[in-house]
Image (cartoon, rainbow, N blue to C red):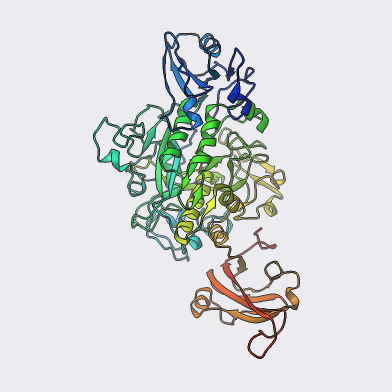
Amino acid sequence: MMKRIVCAMLAMATAIGCVNDPAMEHYDAPHATILGSSADAARGVLMVRMMDDDTALEVEGATVSRMFPANGSDMDRWRLVHFAEDASLDAMAERIAKMEGVAMVEYSCFVERPKTQSLPMPAPHTATTRAVEYPFNDPELPWQWHYHNDGSLSEDAKAGADINLLNAWKYTCGDNRVVVAVIDGGIMAEHRDLADNMWVNEAEKNGLTGVDDDGNGYVDDIHGWNCVRGNGNVTADAHGTHVAGTISAVNNNGFAVCGIAGGTGNGDGVRLMSIQIFENEEGCYSHQIAEGIRYAADNGAAIANNSWGYSPTAYYSDGDYERECGVVQEAINYFKKNAGLEGVMDGGLMIWAAGNDSVDYANYPGGYNSNVCVASMAPNYTPAFYTNYGPGTNICAPGGDSTYGVIMAISSTSVEYASGDGYEYMHGTSMATPHVSGCAALGLSYALKQGYHFSVDEFRNILLTSVHDINQYMTGTRYYYDYKTGTYPTYSIDKYKYKMGTGYIDAHLLLMQLDNTPCLYVETNVEESLPLDAYFGDGAKEICFKGVEISNEVKSNLGITTTPTVEKGVLTICCTKAGIGRIKVKAVAGDTLVGGNMTIGGMAMEREFEVVARGSVADNGGWL
């Protein structure tokens, strides 16, 4: 569980520019910009950005190296300067800032690792009496309410407070050509529920130890890169492993949990690249984070999951962040521009946790306007007690809330189970974030299947609108469990209204939006009357509708005994079973007859819809 990550960064009083400032490219003053503060920065190291890559940097008494393998990009200008750890950082920064060709000197800021809280494990699950039919045999799947919530696991759980994953799985379960970088603690690569879905650098796996077999500038990077140690030995971490499992634990292997884009057990799950920026109880530094982001972009990742962030007091506005940004922000911009999935998405998608400080704004970098930032929803549609919210928050997803019992936290892979590679329950925006990353990975998998192509901006916009309304639930009060006092304080949840982003994500709706297929949501065992004005225009009631085309299979799947009808622009339908199915509504544009041969008339038209029947919906439909 990510409780909070603190960046011990003091106000960057000398920071007067950003690496993205065009003026920086031609900076010719005698003193370069110095970003950050030496307080709690890495000792014996400074990051230096040159005005161009051709100017050599030589610092007496120090070793200068490239921060990143050269590839012709602006990031080639960054240098890492190592010197004695007992030397004055401030004096060295001032000295380098006066050198010819130097555009920027930056202290490497310390970032604490995510804090996790081990929740007491329930007894291992081997069977369930829940009524729904699950597509996979993983024993923990019925307890992953965040994928399918029918309200039966707890009196506090509400049906539908989930990501609607079972319906999405009917279209795709993943694709091994999609790579998600987990920028976090290291993933347990040998975990029985993760090993088959790990990203593998085949050249390094089959090459010589100690040799950069693929020439990417990194040695023995088989499953990613350990940025803390500067080598390819990714070590297992509970937090990073838990996050990874939500995205792509192997499905249908009869063990532990399922991943959102984990495939069908036939090697078709989304691949997980481990970018380790935290190890043991150690935090990391800016230069290590930047290296990890750049590595992910250069080695095939299309999505980067970031379940970490700075302290909520580090930045209060995008302007503050821009003025004090440095190598990490440049690496983020690099990922957005240079990562992606060839033929499907141009550019990389970065997804961040909003933070667990219960404050009314998101932590940075997630809160920055071009980053997708995720808040956390409890199993009853209300905000999780710990979640940040408000400005900077773009979307929300299930993140668990153990106030309602451990079973209402998020179940995913972990290194903490008795066997060493089982599963564990955690909660936090760290756990909500991989739900959005997993849905995005599932969306890219479906785009591959359908042959779709998007810019990263187009795909991100579809992702952020594949949501349902959460604001209707922001009334009244709720309680939470205070671990420090052992009490259950009560507070108003009205303050969260309109501050949880666009709504809570729906994996199935995302796929339908990629298809440009509208969804019609109905409650089972209720005859629904659904106006079609939004799809046929405001004059729908005057259009001549010719009926609804529906297969016997769809009728059976949805328990439809009477064929749906359309009169005066209103569709009447009754489903007795939960599920999904396609229907076509047929009409004539401009007349009551279709023109042709000896007849002058209108034009035949039809619109396809996805009917989604669930056990219950909100009074207003519950969807945006």
User: Which of 555/359 is in front?
Assistant: 555
Is residue 306 visible to us here? no
**How far from the left and from the top, in percent, is residue 381?**
62, 52
Residue at the (34%, 33%) spot, across then down: 232
Q: Quadrant of the C terminus?
A: bottom right
User: Which of 442/385 is in front?
Assistant: 442
The quarter holding residue 448 reads bottom left
Q: Please indicate whether residue 42 sits to the left or right of residue 359 in the image.
A: left
The quarter holding residue 530 reads bottom right
**How far from the left and from the top, in percent, is residue 4?**
55, 32
Is residue 158 visible to us here? yes
Q: Residue furthest bottom?
A: 598
Instruction: Work out whether 164 lies above or below 271.
Output: below
User: Which of 533/29 is in front?
Assistant: 29
Instruction: Work out whether 595 lies above or below 73.
Output: below
**How far from the left and from the top, in percent, is residue 249?**
40, 50
